[in-house]
Image: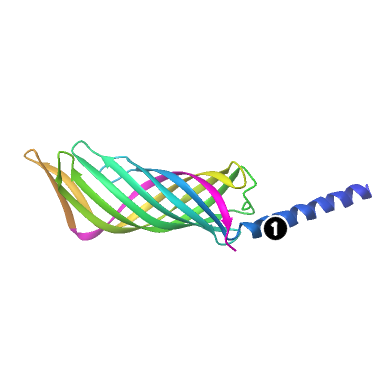
Amino acid sequence: MKHIIIFATAMLLYTAAYSQQQAQKNAGMFSLGTRNTLSAFNHDEAIGKGIGGQARLQLSKRINSEWYFDYITSKTNLTARNDYHIGWSLLFYLKNNYDFTRLLQPYLIAGHCFDNTKVFEKANKQNNASRLSMATQAGLGTHINITPKFDCSLSTQYMLHFGKDIDADTNDGKVLIQKSTNTEMDGHLLFTLSVNYKLKNLW
């Protein structure tokens, strides 16, 4: 019985030491990845589909950072819309699940981005309006750790934009695209699927 207790204690100490060592190794880890996005419940009710890339730099064992670029397109019957997102997010890992050894690694995510939007008539691209805006976003996500270095990640965020809204309407068969003169809030859901690989520990 004494040998069993000694063995169990040694295993617990080894596991704790390994987890701490792994956490220290992960701080400073630099990753690169690709991403696909889906924007839903937009003001114009169109579904946006996008592609992009991202880099991650882990700041501590519980906090990771994500720096990304998205190109998102959506269409209605008469108009099309292009969005360019460039921004950053912080990922906060829950409890002690931060060493990338478990299959699922959930996190809270929040951040900020800048957005360049252009709306144009599909039959006449000269009929258009554009805006620059900024946004804040927050939500939930999880890594699906294929290996400790390679993951597939899913996240859902609500993104709230602050800028001049662009409206498209028809009048006597003509498409009218107008940008408002006042700053307004415009929100939508953003679903992201990414594939990422850890390249190097920077410190």
42 lies left or right of 24: left
Vertical placement of 109 versus 44: above or below? below
Residue 198 magenta-highlighted: yes
Which residue in the protein does label 1 denote?
A: 21
For the view shown, which residue lies furthest in the right direction?
A: 2
Where does residue 159 sit, x and y in percent of width and height?
Answer: 37, 52
Q: Give the range drawn in magenta.
A: 181-203
* Picture residue at 25% right of the left edge, 45% below the top: 81
Residue in the foreground of this view, choosing between 188 and 122? 122
Local packing at callout 1 (Cα closer than 10 Å; few below 14, some 14-19, many 20+) is few
- Residue placed at 62% from the left, 47% from the top? 148
State the image coordinates of residue 151 (x, y, percent, origin top left). 55, 44
Q: Quadrant of residue 16?
A: bottom right
Give the left or right position of residue 136, taking residue 121 as reference: right
Q: What residue type is labelled 1?
A: Gln
Which residue is situated farthest in the left direction here? 172
The foreground one among 122 and 190 is 122
Picture residue at 55% right of the left edge, 46% below the top: 143
Residue 90, percent from left and from top: 49, 58
Secondary structure at numbered mark 1: helix
Q: Pick whichever, 180 or 48, lies toward us.
A: 48
Q: Is residue 197 magenta?
A: yes
Q: In this view, does 158 lie to the left or right of 5?
A: left
